[in-house]
Image (spheres, rainbow, N blue to C red):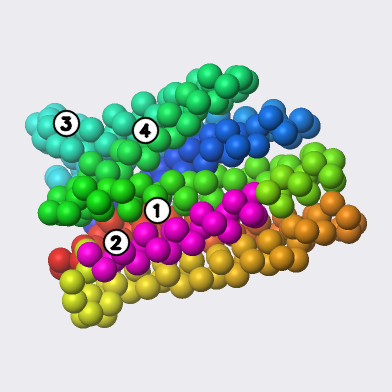
Amino acid sequence: MLTDIISAIVRALSFIALFQATGIAMFIAIFGRRLHLAAAAIRRVGFVSAIAGILFVSAHYGLEAARMAGALSGVFDWSLQHLVLDSSMSIAWGMRVAGLAIISVVINRTGRTWTQLGLAGAALTISGFLVVGHTAAHADRGWLAVLLSLHLAVVAFWFGALAPLCIVSRKETADVGGAIVEDFSRIASWWVPGILLAGVLLTAVLVDRWAVFGESYGIVLLAKVAGFAVLMGLAALNKWRYGPTLATVPGVAVSFRRAVAAEYLLICAVLSATAVMTTFFSPER
């Protein structure tokens, strides 16, 4: 049980780090040319996130053998580690680490080629989720992979943009910061509903009976949906109240950053719930 708890914690931290790194790579691809005073700080956060992601993803991968053994000593059981190496988990680990490594190398470099490489690293990192889990084993895994990719890409874009938006509102001039926030809100208003759409479709396929929502897996799933509903409320607050007045009303930037910080913490909670759900529970149980 202890190994499972440690694994879930490390998994949650890996999700937070890798989604932030991939999201910042997306943010830079879209807004990088418009960043001036905030550029260095945003790139620094992206670099640290990518390195942290590599460490946590690798730590979680190493703990899989310990989970098989039921004790932390299993980390040093090379026969169990060999079993993990021969599984799809090793492919997922390799894709995520490779993608994050690319992001860490190019995130502090400017230019179209480096930006495109950063996006390629983000795509590779997200693709690591497609080779493991229920969607990978499902008979309809082809179109489920498309839905999951959409779901994860939008989560990464939304979550990864939150820290940069706070930095932009603090460091850039009011005109530049307000314009970037407004444009982000306009893009997000089209993309973010895709999280709900893809999530509902994935759930409809993977959950084949209503009774699941009375079990641990279903309860955590419903908690994620509730968290998403609150997130949409906070996002709407930023879009319709704080964002449009960021460049013109003094003091709004502080309220904006508080709302963004609340979004950040709530998404961290949702990612942690996902880590717990995928570690301990399954819709088949």
Measure how far apart labels 2 and 3 are at the Cα level.
28 Å
Q: Residue at x 51, y 71 (%)?
A: 229
Q: Are marks 1 and 4 in contact (CB under 8 Å)?
A: no
Q: Position of residue 142 (x, y in %)?
A: 21, 48
Q: Work out whether residue 140 can be spotted.
A: yes
Picture disc at residue 85: 3
Amino acid type assigned to the residue bearing label 2 in the image: Leu
> Measured from the top left, where is residue 83 in percent x and y?
11, 35
The residue lying at 45 percent from left, 58 percent from top is 194
For the residues labelled 4 and 2, the Cα–Cα distance comes to: 21 Å
Label 1 neighbour load within 10 Å: few <14, some 14-19, many 20+: many
Mark 2, mark 3: which one is toward the viewer? Answer: 2
Residue 62 visible (yes or no): no
Q: Are marks 1 and 2 in contact (CB under 8 Å)?
A: yes
Amino acid beneath label 3: Leu
**Residue type marked 1:** His
Q: Distance between the residues labelled 1 and 3?
A: 28 Å
Q: Residues within 10 Å of mark 3 (few under 14, many from 20)?
A: some
- Residue at which label 4 appears: 124
Secondary-structure class at tag 4:
helix
